Image (tube, rainbow, N blue to C red):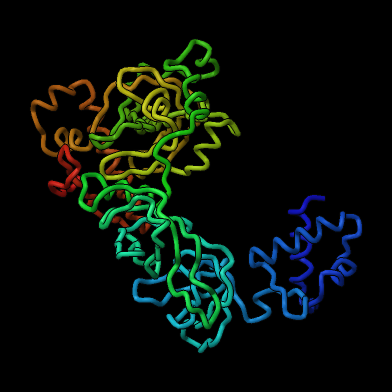
Amino acid sequence: MTTLSLKDKIMAFMQRESYAPMTAEEMIFAIPVKEEPMHEFWDAIMELEKDGYVVKTRFDTYGLPEKMGLVAGRFQLSSKGFGFLIPDNKGTKPDVFIPPRKLHGAMNNDRVMARIDSHTAGRRPEGEIIRIIQRANIRVVGVFKRTMDFAFVIPDDKRIGSDIYILRKNFGGAANNQKVVVEITEWPTEEHNAERRSAEGRVVEVLGYVGDPGLEILSIIKQHDLPLDFPDNVKRAAARVPDEIREKDWQGREDRRDYPVVTVDSEDARDLDDAVYVRRLENGRYLLGVYIADVSYYVKAKTLLDQEAQERGTSVYLVDRVLPMLPQRLSNGICSLNEGVDRLVMSCEMEIEAETGRVAKYKIFPAVIHSHHRLSYNLVRAILEEGDKKTREDYADIVPMLEEMRELCRILQKKRARRGAIEFDLPEQKVILDDAGKPLEIKQR
């Protein structure tokens, strides 16, 4: 039996209504766990305590936090000095207000345990942090401010709660008013009578002087620990993926290359992962085809590429660059539905009734497409709303299809309105930079 299943077994036992705090030795005989090696039980109970799921009392007995007036969760500190504990099981428990005098060294995003001091009906409960379970801010980005023999780093994120104290031996070559990355070596103590009110740290990286071009973007990347590049083994795995579709890749796929499929994205988009096609059928319905890049064909489960994508979670779009989830060889190449090339996709083709917008039938299948045009939102607007003659002539082969798309869009919008859906018209802004990376203007997309 694994340690994980032992944890579940222990938690289930302690969550019984009849459970009363007991020692680990008593628990061994009460559960029982005789068939498991004893060291696995001790590992499991210590991990549960370390992670804040169980509490060890001064009598060496174990109990559940919620049965002892305690709550564990993520701490969010405001710039005004107070904070809130967001419980682990947020759906069933309210946030807990933590006043400044009861933080006891907790910093923003730390996982903590708090004691509930008061809970008045109709008001948010108030508590006091009694334990830091896991620190969140191992590294902090900020501005280096030096005196003669020591320095402070003022964090960019004001929710960190305090400046970071730096001894002279830990300056790391930093100069006054430089942006630096600091690794925290000593935390503000949790004890109620603490003398150390600031964290201590050492400079591990100098990013540049305040005001340097591109420094703010680099600071954001470092502050959120975003990866600037891919590991060499991931790059090698990406290099083994073919640049073009091979004949064997077509097997079992339907051919949609003769459909005038188009992509519609912003002008600066590089990874084009979806495409569309519409035509009116003889039965009066609309055929809507939605084609999604078949990334899973090239990125197999549990491979290096899959594990790296899982670690990153998403592509990150910054003002001047994109930090992609997959190497650009894939995200901008074989997995991007670029104009004028064949690509593998997963397809969903739907027949939609013109009168009601109801999907009469649909089919999901793997296919091959050939993107006929790479359109932008501004191009489509020029064709459909502004009626720009030159643009309509340049894209004459798909203007009728775009007009049918507009008709279908209006039908689906009416269906949404009948269903009571809310339309959020939130304009998206784009920051225009010069060659040095300084902002020139903010435009609406």
Reply above or below: 336 against 189: above
Question: Which is nearer the eye, 122 or 394?
Answer: 122
Residue sitting at the far top? 247
**Where, quadrant-wise, is the C terminus in this rendering?**
top left
- Image coordinates of residue 235 in percent, x first then y, are 47, 27
Reply above or below: 289 against 38: above
- Image coordinates of residue 7 in percent, x first then y, are 75, 59
- Image coordinates of residue 400 in percent, x first then y, are 22, 27
Question: Which is nearer the eye, 440 or 56?
Answer: 56
Compared across the picture, whether 106 is left or right of 82 comes to right
Q: Is residue 89 visible?
A: no
How many numbered marks, from 0 up? 0
Reply above or below: 335 against 82: above
Please give the name of the residue rendered at 47% of the width and 35% of the height, measured from the top-left corner: 361
Question: Which is nearer the eye, 407 or 32?
Answer: 32
- Image coordinates of residue 144 in percent, x first then y, are 31, 58
Compared across the picture, whether 284 is left or right of 212 comes to right
Question: Which is nearer the eye, 257 or 54?
Answer: 54
Q: Is residue 60 visible?
A: yes
Compared across the picture, whether 351 is left or right of 16 comes to left
Reply above or below: 130 against 359: below
Please give the name of the residue rendered at 70% of the width and 63% of the height, measured from the top-left corner: 48
